[in-house]
Image: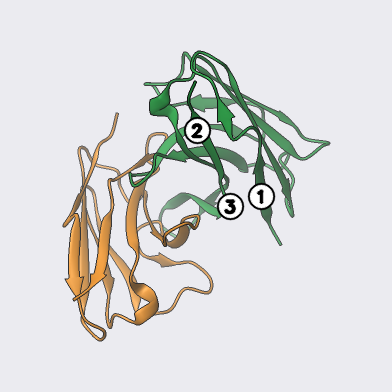
Amino acid sequence: QITLKESGPTLVKPTQTLTLTCTFSGFSLSTSGVGVGWIRQPPGKALEWLGLIYWDDDKRYSPSLKTRLIISKDTSKKQVVLTMSNMDPVDTGTYYCAHRIYEILTASTADYFDFWGQGAQVTVSS
Amino acid sequence: DIQLTQSPSSLSASVGDRVTISCRASQSISNNLNWYQQKPGKAPRLLIYGTFNLQSGVPSRFSGSGSGTDFTLTISSLQPEDFATYFCQQSFKTWTFALGTKVELK
């Protein structure tokens, strides 16, 4: 079965760079249509999509954060890495990675996150 | 960016109630709308993808409908385990989540 797990520091100082690793199993990131996305959630607030890396190494980033984000993958290690620079206290929250799947249905297509990691708590404070 | 507006932001309901949650997109997103359920301290769980397709293992009391800009999640008979926060998400152009609807016990 598909599993994902985030790992990284729980505390980061303002202006520092955050690096989170998503280690996954049960799928290959070289399979067409597959991707791994990053989503975060400030305490008590809504989900925010950050970025995604596709099986072919193409990437998409949230327009509001793209200057601060880099996503990379190591297919053989089954890992995806998120780097976010210039961290601020407003970046405090839970960071999730998720498996993205794209399906061609009978009369339409579907693109969704079907499996999620447990989340990594990140606090930005001096 | 495509914005999603979900309503209501919260609701109170009783076990057995029929519950509907709306999600409106700022432009047409065809059928590229997904629904997730999240309980406190847990990761989101996919309920519905592609507007109306039930994810494997999700009870049939959950259903989705709509197209274009207006979408609905319906829980036909609310169960105790359904008290949670629900988010819609569009995947027409990258991905965006709405602010969510918290379903509480009346």
Q: In the displayed image of the protein, which residue is found farthest to the front?
A: A126
Chain B colour as displayed: orange
Looking at the colours in the rendered structure, which chain would you say is drawn in green? A
How many angstroms separate mark 2 from mark 1 (CA)? 21 Å
Q: How crowded is the residue under tag 3: few (<14 C-alpha within 10 Å), some, or many (20+)?
A: many
Of callouts 2 and 3, which one flags the residue occurring earlier in the amino acid sequence?
A: 3
Three-letter amino acid code at the position of disc 2: Thr
For the point 43% across and 28% down, the residue is A91
Q: Secondary structure at mark 2?
A: strand
Q: Position of residue A101 (x, y in %)?
A: 56, 49
Q: Which residue is mark 1?
A: A4
Residue A123, labelled with which disc?
A: 2
Residue A118, labelled with which disc?
A: 3
- Subunit bearing disc 2: A
Residues B101 and A113: in front is B101
Q: Position of residue B71 (x, y in %)?
A: 23, 57
Please say if A53 is above or below B92: above
Of callouts 3 and 1, which one flags the residue occurring earlier in the amino acid sequence?
A: 1
Judge if badges 2 and 1 mark residues of a common chain: yes
Q: Could you tell me if the residues under marks 2 and 1 are in contact, i.e. CB atoms within 8 Å? A: no
